[in-house]
Image (cartoon, rainbow, N blue to C red):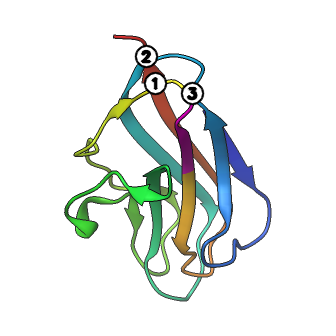
Amino acid sequence: MTGYVVGVPAASEVIAALVAPAAAQIRTVVAQAAAGGSGTVAIIDLQINGVSAYTDPSHRPQLAAGQSGKFTSYQPDHSAVRPGDLVSLVAVSSGNKSKIVATAALEEP
């Protein structure tokens, strides 16, 4: 699942989403911003049915203020997806960054 935002995403803006057609595992989440802003840290959250897949919020994909490039990322704490689950990548804060692309890699167990 991949999404792209040309401009600066608003807080809580959904970057990408899918309804799981089968059971799956989320293996990783990666993101990149082509244009760095002068604002705060940019943070993206992986959510399953509206709930963060990260137990520790500091493990959500992040990119430091004023930077562009690849976000730091950790494997999500909750990665199991059941048929019908809504999986989404959501901008928590944009850090005034634009041209953000984010991907969650899912595979069937």
Instruction: Rate crowding at label 1 as few (under 14), some (14 to 19) or many (20 or more) other CA atoms within 10 Å.
Output: some
In the rendered structure, find residue 106 and report the number of the disc placed on it: 1
In front: label 2 or label 3: 3
Q: What is the quadrant of the C terminus in the image? A: top left
Q: Nearer the viewer, residue 104 or 50?
A: 50
Find the magenta span and give its range: 84-88
Label located before the other in sequence (2 or 3): 3
The one nearer the camera, 79 or 21, is 21
Asked whether the beta carbons under mark 2 and mark 1 sit within 8 Å of each other, the answer is yes
Circle 2 SS class = strand
Q: Is residue 76 above or below residue 85?
A: below
Residue 42 is marked as: none
Q: Is residue 93 positioned above or below 91 on the image?
A: below
Q: Tag on residue 107? A: 2
Residue at image x 50%, y 49%? 31
* Amino acid at circle 3: Ala
> What is the distance, in whole Å, between disc 2 and disc 3 at their CAs?
11 Å
